[in-house]
């Protein structure tokens, strides 16, 4: 019984260390929720801030975005916006990460682009 508890504790610690290692790959900054529109002709909405993560939908130019977080992916040197896209064509809501330059253009975003973390 004690051995099983030790194994569970060791596994939990290992998971915490592994998760901590993954968290350093992306730096996220939370901001007040804001609203903007998609400025690119189309942008893929993904499950994680990465160009290789699963695509959950596509947002199109002038679709509304309610964002609540930005994430910087050091490996890709790319900022991502996290939020919900509401498509104008079918009112479908898609939640996930999209490339910052398509979902948070300077013209419609009151906050400046975050600085690159060191």
Image (cartoon, rainbow, N blue to C red):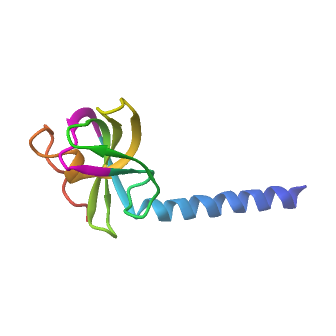
Taken as a whole, is the magenta stretch helix, strand or loop?
strand
The answer to whether 63 is drawn above or below residue 75 in the figure is above
Point 15% across, 41% down: residue: 111
Point 24% across, 33% down: residue: 34
The residue range painted magenta reads: 31-43
Residue 36 among magenta residues: yes
Q: Estimate the x, y position of residue 73 in percent, counting from the top left.
A: 33, 62
Between residue 88 and residue 11, name the one nearer to us: 88
Give left or right: position of 8 versus 36: right
The answer to whether 6 is drawn above or below residue 110 in the figure is below
Point 26% across, 50% down: residue: 42
Snapshot quadrant of residue 117:
bottom left
Between residue 101 and residue 43, name the one nearer to us: 43
Q: Estimate the x, y position of residue 5 in percent, counting from the top left.
A: 81, 55
**Most extreme residue toward the left, as rendered?**
107
The answer to whether 92 is drawn above or below residue 79 in the figure is above
Quarter of the image for the N terminus: give it. bottom right
Between residue 13 and residue 91, name the one nearer to us: 91
**Most extreme residue toward the right, as rendered?**
1
């Amino acid at each position: 019984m004690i051995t099983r508890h030790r194994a569970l504790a060791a596994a939990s610690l290992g998971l915490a260390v592994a998760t901590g290692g993954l968290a350093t790959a992306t730096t996220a900054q939370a901001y007040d929720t804001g609203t903007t529109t998609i400025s690119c002709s189309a942008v893929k909405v993904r499950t994680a801030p990465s160009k290789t993560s699963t695509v959950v939908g596509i947002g199109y130019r002038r679709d509304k975005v309610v964002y609540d977080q930005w994430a910087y992916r050091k490996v890709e040197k790319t900022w991502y916006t996290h939020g919900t896209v509401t498509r104008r064509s079918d009112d479908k809501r898609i939640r996930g990460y999209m490339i910052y330059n398509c979902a948070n253009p300077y013209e419609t975003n009151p906050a400046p682009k975050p600085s690159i973390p060191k």
